[in-house]
Each structure stands twice: as C-alpha cells, then as structure tokens.
Image (tube, helix red, strand yellow):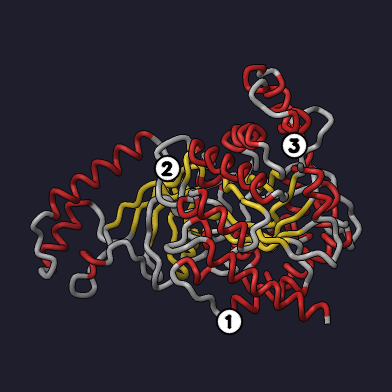
C-alpha cells in the first residue's frame, strides 16, 4: 500500500489536496472514523507522543486502543474500497513538567488560594531535573502545604506570611522536569525556555548546582503551571532525537502496517539514515516472529519484506533544519561536515533524504518565532516541490473547532493559503483527536474550505 500512497501523492497539481486527521480519545469509534472518511479524510495520523503502554491520561491513547483503531481503518478500506493511509508520527525527545511546587506571594484578596499556579512577569522559577531525592522532597513539601494550609485564613496577611515562612520560601515556583533530559544545566544560559508552546517564556539567570534559576520574561494571561506541559529549551541540541520510546514505537508502527513513519525534530539529513537503520533492524525482528507473521495477510508479508522501503517523512520544526547559521552550529556540535559555500541550504539536503516533509508549525514557531513561520511555510513547500516530494501543512488549522462548531475566518484563510501554495496534505491535530464535539465536523469544514480554494486555483 505504501508505494501506492506515495504514487497518489506524486506532485500532480490536478489532484485534490488530501486531508489527514489525528486519532485520539474523541475519534476511537468505528462510526466516527467512518463519518470522517465520508467527509474527506485520506490519512489517519497516530501521534506517538500521546500513545502510552497503559492507563492513558487526558488526550492519550493506549497501544491497545491504537491497535483497535487500526482494525477499524482496515475495515473502512474494504468498505469504501479506497486507499486510507496510516501515518505514524514518532514523538521524538520530550521534556515535560513533572511536578510544580508553588509558594506564590499574595498581592490581592484570595490570589494565593485561587490563582497560585498562575505566574506573573519577573517572578522567580527554580528548575530541577528529575531525581528520586527531589521527588521525595517535592512530595514532603506538598504534604506540608496541605496540612498547614488546611483551615488557613487566606484574608489574613500575617497568617499567609507565617505559612510561607513555614514552607521555607517567600516567592516563586519550583519545577521538576522529566523526559529526555539529564542535566538542566546543559541548557544554554543565553537561550530562553518556553513552556506550553511559548505561553510562558523563562529567562535563565543562573545555572549551577544541578539547577536553573529563571525569571518569567513573558506569560500569557491564561497560562498556568501544570504537570505534563511541554518544556522547550530554545534551540537546544539533543544528543539523540530518536528516543528509546521512538524505537519501540517504530516496531509497533510496522506491526500496524503504517504506510508512512515520520520523524520529529529533524536536524540534519543524517537523521534519515539513522531512522532507516532502525526501521530495517525492527523489520528483521518482525520477520523472525513466525507466530505473528502467520496471522498476517500476503499484502502485509510484502509490506514487511526486506525489499520494500517504508516511506519516511521529516517534520520540519527546528531552527537547525531551516536556518543556515543554526544548522552550522548543530553540525559543529555533532561533528558533521557541511558545505562551506554561502548558498548551502540544510533543508534541501533533508528533502533529498526523506520521502516527504511536514511543516510542523507549532514547535517551529517556538524555535524561530511565530512571525517567521508563514514565510518558512512557503519556502518549505517550494523546496518539497523542487525535490518532487509530498508536503504536509500542520498545526491549528481549525483550532477553534476544538471548543465549538464554527471555524474562524482566519482559519479558513489559512487553509486557503496552504491550498494556493499547493500543499499536498492538510492536517488536523487536536481538532479530531481531542474535540469536545463531533470529530467529523472539522473534517467537513476543511473539505469545504479546500474545495473553494481549489476552484479558485483552477480559474
């Protein structure tokens, strides 16, 4: 199926723009998936960052649930007699907030009680890496807080001051980070740390004793510190962008029969070679699993064979992939040789090695500033066309429909622009994975917007 899907995505501008929808807790049922296909979905995306072994949290799926959705998709292929692609998006390295300890000062009536997770500009935030010792310390302090705060008169400033003195701090927050980070002191001190895709920006003031002392440089009025939030050290170089979880997810994706596997946070063309090497190793593992192969179709046997190459896409979401100066810094750090000529474009080489590209505008906006993303989107699409590779435009295309039935005029304009720029696939993320209402409605809305744009383009 994979080769057929890539052929169907060959740069033929008389064909229709495709729609990719992300599956999640809101789109697990067969009937929902069916209506999404009826409304125009061509690909279903599995977000590896939100698929867990068991006990899925809000917005997550378990691997068992993901496999059930794959079975639904296979039935839909037979029912509709059409190609419906499975796109597996590897999560890549993640740094997340694990715990938050807040002892925010009181400035207004009830502020400590009601808004004590909402930081203010210039407040101090201390960041620690995950450790057993620090986890126990946080747990102890949380218990102390609960015991001491029970029955506290939040209108009495002297009581509040006494409470804070008991905790041992009078201002700020303490945060513990986990995930793919060993030393927070590895973060470049001159670069900020973004939380929740830039809703909060922290400036590093000091880096010592295995901790960072930061100051809130910018904060959105709706932002609150919460466990599970993503933390992006600005233009941070990860030692490995393919994590252990990614390696396990590659095998799971292959067992699912994923038509395309995409790599997050691509930094250089060599990432394609590393991904291919792991895919081939996982194929070898599966080919030795006779009991599993015995249950699979002849089509799957051809899919998993050594001769068949699984298409891989690069998610373009780092400064290293699009900015020459940053690409050279990355290459120097990783001891990679790159051309010395001034016209060298790192994205051209990435496009050559991968089978397709995704304009992943969320993290890209954090890495290069959101004001630069529209022009970078245009450039990425042009380079994909130049290399005859399919290209996806993703992130917040119909974000407002996560909370209601109506799209905004700006969102329709965004879709229109992507179609006129001749993107091959437009992607829905949380709009179909974690929507409060019907996941088929954003698909229908996107299809209408695409149809109008394509009619204008054909005139």
On screen, residue 400 versus residue 275, left or right, reads left
CA–CA distance in space, label 1 to label 3:
42 Å
Q: Earlier in the sequence, mark 3 or mark 2?
A: 2
On screen, residue 77 versus residue 378, left or right, reads left
Q: Mark 3 or mark 2: which is in front?
A: 2
Q: Earlier in the sequence, mark 2 or mark 1?
A: 2
Quarter holding the N terminus is top right
Q: Give the percent coordinates (x, y) of residue 224.
A: 37, 63
Q: Earlier in the sequence, mark 1 or mark 3?
A: 3
Q: Is residue 379 above or below residue 67?
A: below
Element carrying mark 1: helix
Q: Give the percent coordinates (x, y) of residue 402.
A: 47, 66
Count the marks. 3
Element carrying mark 3: helix
Where, by quadrant of the figure, is residue 301 drawn? Answer: top right
Residue nearest the viewer, comparing 246 with 176: 246
Residue at image point 47% right, 72% down: 405
Can residue 266 be seen here?
no
**Disc 2: which residue:** 56
Q: Is residue 301 above or below residue 31?
A: above
């Amino acid at each position: 199926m994979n080769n057929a899907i890539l052929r169907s995505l060959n740069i033929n501008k008389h064909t229709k723009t495709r729609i990719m929808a992300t599956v999640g807790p809101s789109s697990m049922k067969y009937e929902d998936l069916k209506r999404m296909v009826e409304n125009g979905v061509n690909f279903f995306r599995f977000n590896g960052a939100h698929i867990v072994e068991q006990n899925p949290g809000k917005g997550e799926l378990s691997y068992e649930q993901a496999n059930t959705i794959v079975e639904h998709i296979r039935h839909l292929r037979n029912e509709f007699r059409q190609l419906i692609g499975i796109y597996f998006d590897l999560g890549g390295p993640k740094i997340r907030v694990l715990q938050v300890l807040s002892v925010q000062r009181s400035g207004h009536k009830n502020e400590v009680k009601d808004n004590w997770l909402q930081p203010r500009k210039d407040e101090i935030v201390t960041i620690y890496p995950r450790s057993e010792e620090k986890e126990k310390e946080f747990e102890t302090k949380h218990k102390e807080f609960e015991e001491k705060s029970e029955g506290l008169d939040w209108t009495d400033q002297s009581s509040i001051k006494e409470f804070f003195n008991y905790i041992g701090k009078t201002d700020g927050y303490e945060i513990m980070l986990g995930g793919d980070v060993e030393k927070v002191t590895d973060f470049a001190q001159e670069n900020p740390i973004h939380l929740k895709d830039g809703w909060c920006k922290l400036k590093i003031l000091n880096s010592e004793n295995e901790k960072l002392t930061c100051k809130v440089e910018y904060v959105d009025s709706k932002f609150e510190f919460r466990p599970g939030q993503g933390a992006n050290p600005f233009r941070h170089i990860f030692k490995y962008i393919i994590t252990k979880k990614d390696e396990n997810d590659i095998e799971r994706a292959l067992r699912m029969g994923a038509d395309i596997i995409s790599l997050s946070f691509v930094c250089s063309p060599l990432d394609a070679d590393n991904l291919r090497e792991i895919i081939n190793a996982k194929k070898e593992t599966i080919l030795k699993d006779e009991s599993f192969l015995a249950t699979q179709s002849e089509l799957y046997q051809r899919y998993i064979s050594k001769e068949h190459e699984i298409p891989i896409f690069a998610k373009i979401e780092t400064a290293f992939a699009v900015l020459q100066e940053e690409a050279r810094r990355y290459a120097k750090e990783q001891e990679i040789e790159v051309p010395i000529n001034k016209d060298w474009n790192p994205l051209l080489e990435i496009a050559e090695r991968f089978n397709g590209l995704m304009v992943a505008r969320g993290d890209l906006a954090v890495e290069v500033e959101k004001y630069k993303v529209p022009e970078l989107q245009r450039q990425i699409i042009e380079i994909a066309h130049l290399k005859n590779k399919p290209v996806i435009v993703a992130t917040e295309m119909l974000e407002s429909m996560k909370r209601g039935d109506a799209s905004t005029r700006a969102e329709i304009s965004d879709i229109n622009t992507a179609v006129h720029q001749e993107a091959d696939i437009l992607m829905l993320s949380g709009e179909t994975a974690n929507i409060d209402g019907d996941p088929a409605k954003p698909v229908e809305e996107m299809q209408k917007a695409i149809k109008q744009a394509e009619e204008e383009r054909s005139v």
